[in-house]
Image (spheres, rainbow, N blue to C red):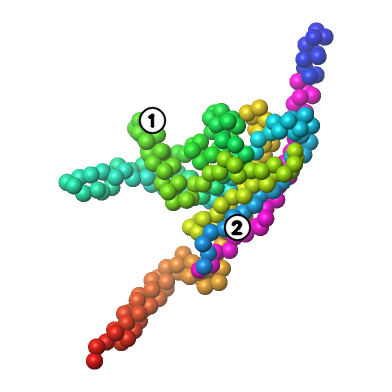
Amino acid sequence: MRFLSTIFATFCIALGAAQATQLQIGLSNESVAITSSFDGDSVVVFGSIEGGDPEALTLAQYDLVVALVGPDADIVVRRKQRRAGIWMNGASLPFIRVPSFYSMASNRKLIEIAEPPVLSKNRIGFEYLKFETGATLIADSEIQTFRESLNRLKASQELSLKRTDGVKFLSPTLFRAKLSVPANVPIGRHTARVWLFKNGEVIAREAARLEVRKIGFEQFMYNLAYKNGLLYGIIAVLVAIFTGWLASVVFRKD
């Protein structure tokens, strides 16, 4: 009985120590402004490990993964097929609630930090995210093929970025991560997420908000296009007519 009590007490102490470990994080800026000259930016996530195991900190036994995740959006992945010598869209599969942007940094490769089931459970790494397809009667192998195409599509558009050396420990408890923000980053509220690992398991997590927004004339046109589409269309037609008339005057031959 005493032996069981000792094991239970040891377990409680270990559990309490794990729960005591926390993350404190901050962002270099809380918003990213999109202008006509915007060609990309970066966001720095910095923070500290609070209440960590002193020995684990000294021996650098903690791992960190940081991600900047954009607002969710539905996306349809289409397969290109060659018919009669022409490439055209073939079968398609919709994916529901896909992060429009996912920029991730870690202190080493994800597969070295944790096993895939742990990464999938905690939704860490774009390739480990699970999405509903909204489709029935489709084989898992077929879904996986479309999923791989989705991964390649996001990577080619620079909407899924990954740096395995992007997290730097400034001291045993202080860290810094630099996340890339491309020129085509989606507008809206993004979330910076940080996960702390020890022995392949998540022991702490924290999040902070970041707003990506247009400013100035770009914001005016964006609001006009999405909130008053008819007026935006009329203005676009008038501008096209005026541009065509002006070109005919300038380049008119006498």
What is the three-letter code of the residue carrying label 2?
Glu
Residue 155 lies within the magenta run:
no
Residue 154 x %, y %:
44, 47
Mark 2–mark 1 distance (CA, rounded to whole Å): 36 Å
Q: Quadrant of the N terminus?
A: top right
What is the three-letter code of the residue carrying label 1?
Asp
Q: Does the rendering let one see residue 245?
A: no
Farthest residue, direction left: 84
Residue 238 x %, y %:
36, 78
**Mark 2 — residue?**
211
Q: For numbered disc 1, what is the local secondary structure?
A: helix
The residue carrying pointer 1 sits among few (fewer than 14), some (14 to 19) or many (20 or more) residues within 10 Å by Cα, namely: few
Residue at (24% x, 48% y) in the render: 87
Q: Does the rendering let one see residue 147?
A: yes
Q: Nearer the viewer, residue 242 or 65?
A: 65
Residue at (29% x, 84% y) in the render: 251
**Bounds of the magenta segment:** 11-36
Residue 222 x %, y %:
49, 67
Q: Nearer the viewer, residue 230 or 215?
A: 215
The numbered disc on residue 140 is: 1
